[in-house]
Image: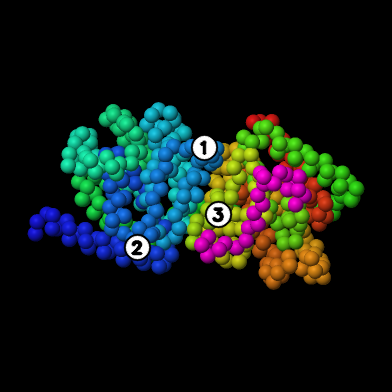
């Protein structure tokens, strides 16, 4: 059999296997599978992607191409645009200029130190670990050509086709500059090749062999996913709390009505002025509210948001994830709701649900909620670095006070809708929620995003304390900007 016929037969068989695996992946709603395609600009990255668009069902393919960040992307956390671009479950995603592109460009052009590059690679590794833990498969490909192959590729008969398909990741680089890119890529591979997401170098002087090679890698990745044979990331360290912070609160703290009205007006005016300060537009504000059922989160949030410009404000009430959201990485829906510069976002319940309700009710595995502490800390650290002030509150009441409020809600027509069967069930697990709350504070209170645990038996007291903390924290941040 001639070489051409042999290649044609291999290609046909591979194409059939890939289509079958793609169909099973889509039916099982697993995934997505992401192919990060990088390497020499002359190695045929675009050609490779076009090949898969010929072989596979295009309805379940997504291609993302990233240049250096522009506009709002430059003001948001660096990984924000990659989170938002994640394709849905059951699909394949092709990434050109992935989250590696910007640091590689900067390192190879001498615009980034090795220590800063290493820090960004560590952040990327944590990001990839989180994606894999949430069911995403990563296939990281570096298409390689030797220097002598670069001079003669693509072949003369393919040059016109190449020019029409080319997607240049590095721009017009000389051979010497490409050597710097390869040096940076070697460093990248050393820092980010892991058991769950290794870098794979693909020889690319022969386009047919390159496509077959990558096709086989993709097929194996999909088959492993369908059979549940994927490598799992290692767990994160976490610390069980040895104390109960709720026992240390003074639940007798209260404010008289006239003092409350005076303080409310004062702090609301102060917060209004702070959010109108010219420096506020350089950053943003994220307020996170957690606490016992009926602890007064909604009322506290209303007193804070009442004085803010609605044009810069969003309040998100976090509920159980939808079917679609359950098929996506857990933090994705929260990444999509973070504030842009000059804006305020409030979470009425939040991403901490993973280490609270999901932990207590068994909605996620022990491994996943234990890993979530480090993932949440990383999320908040990225927000802080990008200029978002994160302020977190836990509003606390006693079991006796909660029971009284539940009974009052039952008797009040305008408040009855707030009380559900789930609220009553949660009371039976009060000790479990207290334990989860203490572990949460122990593992996620950081210098840039501490927890503020407030007694809320007297709602007026809790509201004023929350307003005071927001104003003082924001004022301190604005002085530093």
State the residue lying farthest toward the left: 1
Distance Cα–Cα, label 1 vs label 3: 22 Å
- For the record, the magenta segment spans 302-326
**Label disc, if present, on residue 71 of the rendered structure:** 1
Q: Indicate whether residue 303 is drawn in magenta.
A: yes
Secondary structure category for the residue under label 3 = helix
Lower position in the chain sequence, tag 3 or tag 2: 2
Q: Earlier in the sequence, mark 1 or mark 3?
A: 1
Q: Nearer the viewer, residue 140 or 323?
A: 323
Q: Which mark is residue 363?
A: none
Mark 1 in CB contact with mark 3 (< 8 angstroms): no
Q: Residue at x 82, y 41 (%)?
A: 266
Left or right: residue 44 versus residue 69 is left
- Residue at the spot x=52%, y=37% of the render? 71
Q: Quadrant of the N terminus?
A: bottom left
Q: Residues within 10 Å of mark 3 (few under 14, many from 20)?
A: some
Answer few, some or many: residues within 10 Å of disc 2's Cα (few below 14, many 20 plus, some between 14 and 19). Answer: many
Pointer 1 or 2: first along the chain: 2
Label 1 residue SS: helix
Helix, strand or loop status at disc 2: helix
Which color scheme did the rendering employ for the protein? rainbow
């Amino acid at each position: 059999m001639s070489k051409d016929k042999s290649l044609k037969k291999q290609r046909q068989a591979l194409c059939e296997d890939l289509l079958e695996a793609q169909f099973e992946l889509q039916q099982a709603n697993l995934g997505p599978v992401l192919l990060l395609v990088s390497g020499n600009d002359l190695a045929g990255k675009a050609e490779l992607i076009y090949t898969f668009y010929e072989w596979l069902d295009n309805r379940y393919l997504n291609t993302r191409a990233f240049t250096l960040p522009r506009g709002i992307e430059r003001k948001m956390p660096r990984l924000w645009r990659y989170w938002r671009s994640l394709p849905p479950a059951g699909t394949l995603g092709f990434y050109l200029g992935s989250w590696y592109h910007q640091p590689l460009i900067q390192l190879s052009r001498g615009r980034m130190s090795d220590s800063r590059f290493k820090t960004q690679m560590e952040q990327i590794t944590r990001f990839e670990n989180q994606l894999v833990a949430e069911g995403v498969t990563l296939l990281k490909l570096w298409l390689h050509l030797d220097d002598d192959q670069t001079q003669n590729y693509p072949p003369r008969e393919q040059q016109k086709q190449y020019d029409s398909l080319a997607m240049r990741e590095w721009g017009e680089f000389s051979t010497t500059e490409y050597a710097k890119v390869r040096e940076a890529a070697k460093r990248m591979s050393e820092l980010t090749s892991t058991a769950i997401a290794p870098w794979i170098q693909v020889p690319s002087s022969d386009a047919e062999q390159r496509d077959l090679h990558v096709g086989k890698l993709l097929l194996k990745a999909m088959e492993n996913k369908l059979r549940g044979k994927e490598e799992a990331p290692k767990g994160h360290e976490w610390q069980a709390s040895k104390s109960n912070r709720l026992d240390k609160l003074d639940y007798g703290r209260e404010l008289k009505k006239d003092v409350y009205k005076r303080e409310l007006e004062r702090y609301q005016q102060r917060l209004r002025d702070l959010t109108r300060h010219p420096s506020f537009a350089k950053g943003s504000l994220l307020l996170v509210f957690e606490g016992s059922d009926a602890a007064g989160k909604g009322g506290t949030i209303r007193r804070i948001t009442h004085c803010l410009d609605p044009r810069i404000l969003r309040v998100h009430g976090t509920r159980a994830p939808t079917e679609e959201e359950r098929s996506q990485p857990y933090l994705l829906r929260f990444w999509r709701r973070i504030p842009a510069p000059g804006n305020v976002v409030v979470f009425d319940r939040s991403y901490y649900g993973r280490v609270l309700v999901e932990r207590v009710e068994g909605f996620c595995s022990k491994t996943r909620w234990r890993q979530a502490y480090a993932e949440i800390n990383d999320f908040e650290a990225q927000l802080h670095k990008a200029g978002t002030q994160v302020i977190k509150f836990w509003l606390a009441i006693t079991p006796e006070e909660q029971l009284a409020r539940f009974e009052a809600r039952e008797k009040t027509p305008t408040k009855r809708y707030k009380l559900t069967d789930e609220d009553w069930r949660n009371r039976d697990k009060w000790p479990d929620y207290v334990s989860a709350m203490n572990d949460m504070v122990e593992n996620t209170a950081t210098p840039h995003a501490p927890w503020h645990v407030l007694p809320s038996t007297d709602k007026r007291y809790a509201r004023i304390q929350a307003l005071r903390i927001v104003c003082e924290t924001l004022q301190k941040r604005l002085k530093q900007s």
